[in-house]
Image (tube, helix red, strand yellow):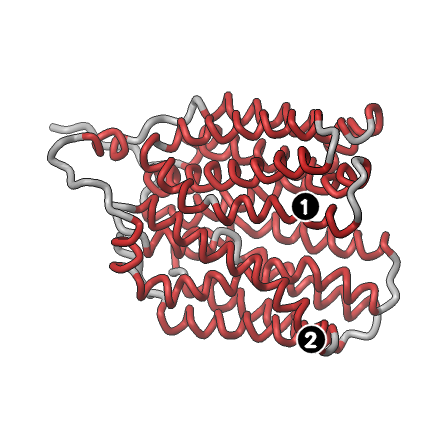
Amino acid sequence: MTPERSPFSLRSIAVAAFGPSLLFGVGQGSIFPIIALSAKELGASLALSGLIVSLFGIGALVSNIPAALIAARYGERRSMVGAATLTVLALFLCLAASAPWMLAIGVLIIGMASSVFLLARQTFLIEAVPISMRARALSTLGGVMRVGLFLGPFAGAALMHFIDLPGAYWVAIAAMIAAGLLSFTVPDLEGRQSEAHPSRPPRPRITGILRNHAAAFATLGLASALVAAVRSCRQIIVPLWASHLGLDAATTAVVYGVMGSIDMLLFYPAGKIMDQFGRQWVAAPSMILMGTALAIMPLTTGLASFVAACLLLGFGNGISSGLNMTVGADASPQTGRTQFLGIWRLITDCGAGGGPLLLSGVMAISTLGLGIAVVSSLGFVAAAVFWRWLPRRVTS
């Protein structure tokens, strides 16, 4: 008689799976608000400061495919430890920077390392968690990262009170060292270890993954890119429309904070709904809610209506926590999963970067209101694509 397996619980892997992500988020969140200020202190112009900040996203974007190759070759645990170590070295370079170009290199390396870390942690959870709990695991992963990004600025501000801007970097260094040490506790996956077995086929090439899964990338990948575009644009739209209404910075910050708190409260319920009832119960509704909130945003004329639109926007974004990771995981093949997810992240990152560019382009030739309307339409298109092509049942 074989012993019965105890039911899987997320708590059994919580520290190893989510702890490094929380610490990584704290580290990133502590430096995000002060990179531009550091650039200005080094003599950079406003335009150059903005470019240096954007190098984080550029570094992550160009590293998605290399990150997939690294994680597939060296495994999730070593990839996360290596990414955390590289980030610490880059943070020391930022601290020691005596010219804007040195800071720029540091920020670029941090973005590149984050791509490796994020892909490795996602792959680990997909392999370690049974499919019946996949959405909850990935939604929690996304939520934990959001919590870290939320706490990071406060931790950085606390130390900056004593040692000015370097305080934020020291908080990030401490958080990244802790993330790297905790990543050592991530167990090696049996499936990853067995990839070296001579009976297994060779790892698929990126070109083969692209060719064999072109339909998934062109449909669900497109929808996920639109989700990323809407999410990134909302961070620009909310403060811009608040300014248009004449709200002061403090009021805008409070509204934005309340909207963000809704995000953090809904990530686990969203994952549970996706696991129990299907991805469709979250995918299309979340995009309809965000599209509707953005569509009514230009119609708001005062604080009350603006807050209502922001709360709806936060609710839609909150229930979509982990959506892109879950849809990508469901669409990924068993063999070549890491490479598939690298391409998937490249597509979604293009959406995250392209959305603000589209918004800026429309505003340049027209008005902020029309720009918001165009972004809202992206949410409705994403909902339609999910409704048409997202499988009702997940089998693998």
- Residue 281, percent across and down? 44, 64
Task: Determine whether the residue tagged by mark 2 lies in a helix, strand or loop.
Answer: helix
Q: Nearer the viewer, residue 109 or 248?
A: 109
- Binning the other alpha carbons within 10 Å of mark 2 as few (below 14), some (14 to 19) or many (20 upward) gives some
User: What amino acid type should be assigned to the residue bearing mark 1?
Assistant: Val
User: What amino acid type should be assigned to the residue bearing mark 2?
Assistant: Ile
Q: Can residue 254 be seen in this view?
A: yes
Quarter holding the N terminus is: top left
User: Which residue in the structure is indicated by mark 2?
Assistant: 296
- Residue 218, percent across and down? 37, 66
User: Which residue in the structure is indicated by mark 1?
Assistant: 53
Residue at 42% over, 72% down: 385
**Sooner in the amino-acid sequence: mark 1 or mark 2:** 1
- Binning the other alpha carbons within 10 Å of mark 1 as few (below 14), some (14 to 19) or many (20 upward) gives many
In the rendered image, the vertical position of residue 152 relative to residue 288, given as above or below: above
Closest to the camera, between mark 1 and mark 2, is 1
Question: How far, Cα to Cα, is label 1 from label 2?
Answer: 31 Å
- On screen, residue 263 versus residue 269, left or right, reads right
Residue at 44% over, 37% down: 121
